[in-house]
Amino acid sequence: MSKTNSNYFEIILSFLPAVAWASLIYYLSNQQILPGFTVDIWDFLLKKSAHIFVFACLYFLLLMPYKKYDLAQGKAQWLIPLIIAILYAMFDEYHQSITPGRHPSLRDVGFDTLGCSLVLLKKLGYI
């Protein structure tokens, strides 16, 4: 993996969409109370679907630089971004634990991981 200085700059820039998306997740997690519906099941479905979608996008954005620039070989090419996304999901829940009006949930990390897994299954051709 020999890269020139300009390639390193391109690689760093290729991670900016993922960093921007992670920043949006951080901002939304910093909100004291997220608006919801009055019907509990619809509120649950909307929020959990949002978890799945948001982290599917994050994983996809992390995956792209690894694929484009061949930053890792074999399984590591999809495993490293997956680990980063799941660790960020855990950080997101920790962040919510110190945000007034919010609470952490391991279940949310599970929904976040499901979003990442759906992208991975699509990438591997299973769905």
Image (cartoon, helix red, strand yellow):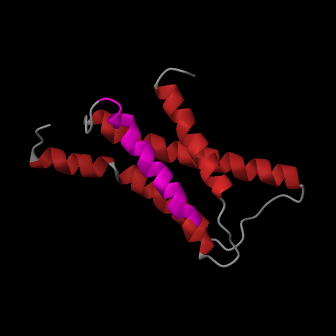
Residue 62 shows in the view: no
Q: Is residue 78 magenta?
A: yes
Residue range of the region highlighted in magenta in the rendering: 74-93
Judge from the rendering whether residue 88 lies leftward or rightward of residue 63; answer left or right. right
Instruction: Identify the residue shown where x is 61% and y is 44%.
Output: 53
Q: Is residue 5 magenta?
A: no
State the residue lying farthest toward the right. 39
Front residue (pair 63, 24): 63
State the residue lying farthest toward the bottom. 100
Vertical side of 95 occupied by 15: above or below: above
Residue 80 placed where, x, y %?
A: 37, 43
Residue 74 placed where, x, y %?
A: 31, 29
Front residue (pair 40, 106): 106
Q: Quadrant of the C terminus?
A: top right
Judge from the rendering whether residue 29 lies leftward or rightward of residue 16; answer left or right. right
Residue 96 placed where, x, y %?
A: 61, 69
